[in-house]
Image (cartoon, rainbow, N blue to C red):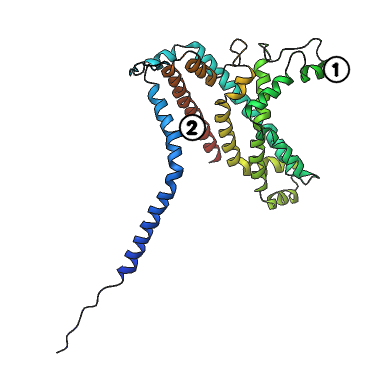
């Protein structure tokens, strides 16, 4: 009679050892993320949540003031504020205008920089100069360009006999917003150019060669080959540009402070004045919350239409 001894099943040991090792690696990865997450939580998440909460309170500037929860009172008041909605319209004109002109000019510049030109590296470097300059410096520089008496723009137009007298570009009701839009386009075009240039370099050259062999003109190759290949990049960069432009503050604040007569009063400037000029923190936070919701709605509609066209 032979006796059999059961051997321990070791097939599961490597698996359990491997799972323990993966869990340990996961814990180590989480620990490595903690130093990066703490500043994000402190400087981004907490202010965001606190701002949302303030929008439902009567918080005001001053010491020893008691803050009360007021529900939707700020938002009801906001709906009746015609000046805020006028600034919101100006913000949309600014954001759409700057984004559209930025895209068209940046696309043309990206197509040019994608060609084999002499000193192309120098031109690409110079194209990034506006992006590298702080917005305050850009605004001060353009204030000098637009200066009514000693500005470069008036001097050039006078020498060309295009104007008879100097124009106060930033104080004129007709010219203030277009003048500010020009500055916004100049300051933000480099980032759009770089993004589109990267997308152009990812378009397979075989597609253009095949189109040329089939007899397609340069315009036909651009319209039927280049643009469809760039569509994901275009959707991404125009969406980001719109959000960035709508939230602009420093550039317009230094240029005009919202004047003349509120003609360049963007929503961010309006909320800033309400919060830091008049001390209505709760009401200003409600403006910020309303702008976030409206912009999310506009961007969702824009992305939905782009996706439907892509399908």
Image quadrant in which the N terminus is located: bottom left
The quadrant in which residue 241 appears is: top right
Neighbor class of circle 2 (other Cα within 10 Å; few <14, some 14-19, many 20+) is few
What residue would you read off at disc 1? 159
Rendered residue at 40%/49% (across/down):
31
292 sits to left or right of 152: left
Kindly tell me whether residue 217 is visible in this rendering: no
Return the residue found at the far front: 63
Task: Tell me where residue 230 appears, x and y as whole percent.
Answer: 63, 42
Q: Is residue 140 left or right of residue 303?
A: right
Q: Which is more N-terminal, label 1 or label 2?
A: 1
Picture quadrant where residue 245 is located: top right
User: Under tag 2, what secondary structure?
Assistant: helix
- Label 1: how many Cα within 10 Å (few below 14, some 14–19, many 20+): few
Secondary structure state at the residue bearing disc 1: helix
Q: Position of residue 182 (x, y in %)?
A: 68, 24
Q: Which residue is mark 2?
A: 300
Pick the residue in front: 178 or 52: 52
Q: Against 260, is 185 above or below?
A: below
Q: Which residue corresponds to the image point at 49% horizontal and 32% vertical from the top-left? A: 300
In the image, residue 231 sits, relative to residue 273, either above or below, namely below
CA gap, disc 2 to disc 1?
48 Å
The image shows residue 67 at horizontal and vertical percentages of: 35, 18
Instruction: Please give the name of the residue rendered at 44% of the width and 50% of the height, measured from the top-left corner.
Output: 32
Q: Nearer the viewer, residue 242 or 257?
A: 257
Q: Nearer the viewer, residue 38 or 227?
A: 38
Compared with residue 24, is residue 224 higher up or lower down, i.e. above or below?
above
Horizontal arrangement in the rendering, residue 177 relative to residue 311 (left or right): right
Residue 201, image x and y in percent?
67, 47
């Amino acid at each position: 009679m032979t006796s059999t001894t059961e051997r321990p099943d070791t097939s599961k040991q490597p698996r359990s050892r491997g799972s323990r090792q993966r869990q340990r690696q996961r814990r180590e990865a989480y620990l490595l993320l903690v130093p990066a997450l703490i500043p994000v939580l402190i400087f981004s998440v907490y202010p965001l949540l606190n701002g949302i909460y303030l929008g439902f309170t009567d918080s005001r500037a001053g010491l020893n003031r008691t803050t009360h929860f007021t529900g939707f009172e700020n938002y009801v008041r906001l709906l009746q504020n015609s000046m805020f909605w006028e600034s919101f319209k100006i913000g949309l004109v600014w954001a759409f205008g700057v984004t559209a002109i930025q895209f068209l000019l940046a696309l043309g510049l990206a197509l040019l920089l994608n060609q084999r030109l002499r000193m192309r590296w120098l031109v690409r470097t110079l194209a990034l100069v506006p992006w590298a300059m702080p917005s305050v410096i850009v605004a001060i520089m353009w204030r000098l360009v637009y200066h009514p008496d000693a500005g470069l723009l008036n001097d050039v137009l006078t020498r060309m006999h295009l104007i008879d007298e100097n124009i106060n570009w930033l104080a004129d009701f007709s010219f203030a917003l277009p003048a500010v839009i020009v500055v916004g386009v100049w300051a933000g075009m480099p980032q759009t150019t770089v993004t589109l240039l990267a997308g152009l370099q990812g378009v397979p050259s075989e597609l253009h060669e095949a189109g040329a062999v089939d007899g397609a003109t340069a315009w036909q190759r651009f319209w039927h080959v280049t643009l469809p290949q760039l569509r994901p990049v275009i959707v991404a960069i125009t969406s980001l540009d719109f959000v960035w432009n709508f939230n602009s503050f420093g550039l317009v604040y230094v240029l005009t402070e919202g004047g003349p007569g509120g003609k360049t009063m963007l929503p961010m400037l309006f909320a800033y004045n309400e919060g830091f000029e008049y001390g209505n923190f709760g009401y200003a936070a409600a403006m910020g919350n309303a702008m976030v919701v409206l912009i999310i709605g506009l961007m969702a509609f824009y992305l939905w239409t782009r996706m439907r066209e892509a399908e």
